[in-house]
Image (tube, rainbow, N blue to C red):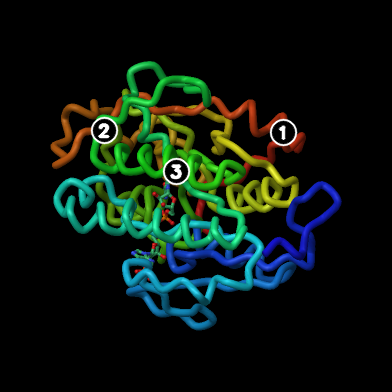
Amino acid sequence: MISGVSDNGGASRKSAIAIVGASGLIGQALHRRLKNGYRILGTCHSRPREGLVSLDICRREFSILDDFDWVIVAAGISNIDRCKLERQRAYQVNVEAVLSMVEYLARRRIRVVYLSSDQVFDGTKGNYREEDLANPINEYGRMKWQVEWQCRQIQPDCLILRLSKTYGADRNEGGILAEVIDTLRQGKPYAAAVDQVFNPTHVDWLARKIESAVSRNLTGLYHLADPRIESRYAFACRVARESGFDPDRIQRISLADLRFPESRGLNSSLNVSRILNALSEPVADYPVSHA
Ligand SMILES: NC(=O)c1ccc[n+]([C@@H]2O[C@H](COP(=O)([O-])OP(=O)(O)OC[C@H]3O[C@@H](n4cnc5c(N)ncnc54)[C@H](OP(=O)(O)O)[C@@H]3O)[C@@H](O)[C@H]2O)c1
């Protein structure tokens, strides 16, 4: 419906923004960030939370989204191994239900922001730019790539943001930060791959950039992540140092030493210069230790 738009066509303070998947790591941060400036709706599915409305996208009943100008699609099965082990279910949610929602929204001229992933790349090169060829090597990446591609056919002015590994400061949110700190707190060493490389990104930084992207009316495909490219090992050492632990307790391993049900690319790091130029904003560092 695009009513609350600013002069540049982006979100204004009058805009109505729905976050589908607001009970997840990224959705929660977006909800925290946007709830004081916009008319907001956040949805949850299996984890009911106060202030969120229940929506199972597989039911394909999307009318609660009718009155919104933007819908940020943060819903899905985001665990790489689960997408392989429960492929059929993951495909239903991540591809079929998401695309059905995108079609519904496009028919109503509601703008879609789709959160994609660095897993669309095979991880052989790293520092990937938007124009680099996607070549996913796992089910999750193939699902994200298919949705990206179809999303652009369905709504050519949608915004697709490819994200890297995201972490939150809240231990209850889980994720890589909690994993490192909880292991070190228990007095155990933490093993981290020196050859797994990405852009570890603080979820609150990410939420701020997504808000900027929507308010500046960006359309098309962008890589969005903290510009610092690091190995999992370097990131774990940084977490240890900033949280008061001895970084020597981080053990250097190779990704091949770990046995996962699903493949992962070694270097899926993203080059984010395109979005940083488009947003022309300074890059603020975030401490990695828990709040
Ligand atoms: N986190 C990362 O590092 C990362 C990196 C790259 C891309 N991404 C992408 O960013 C998006 C958000 O990631 P995230 O880490 O925040 O994921 P998450 O923590 O796993 O949260 C997923 C969200 O999807 C909802 N959901 C799951 N099945 C649903 C269904 N059938 N109907 C409606 N909602 C459903 C969940 O609701 P309930 O929990 O209430 O069931 C939750 O709100 C995902 O698309 C993911 O692929 C994430």
The residue tagged 3 is 116
Label 2, label 3: how far apart the Cα atoms are: 16 Å
The location of residue 216, given as percent across then percent down, is: 75, 46
At 33% from the left edge and 72% from the top edge, which residue is drawn?
A: 59
The residue at the far front in this view is 107
- Vertical position of residue 66 compared to residue 122: above or below: below
Of residue 125 and residue 235, the one placed in the foreground of this image is 125
Of pointers 2 and 1, the one earlier in the residue sequence: 2
Of residue 129 and residue 285, the one placed in the foreground of this image is 129
**Mark 3 lies within 8 Å of ligand 1 (Cβ measured):** yes
Q: Image check: 30 left or right of 253?
A: right
> Image quadrant of residue 80?
top left
Q: Quadrant of the C terminus?
A: bottom right
The residue tagged 2 is 264
Circle 1: residue type: Ala
At 40% from the left edge and 53% from the top edge, which residue is drawn?
A: 99
Circle 2: residue type: Arg
The residue tagged 1 is 278
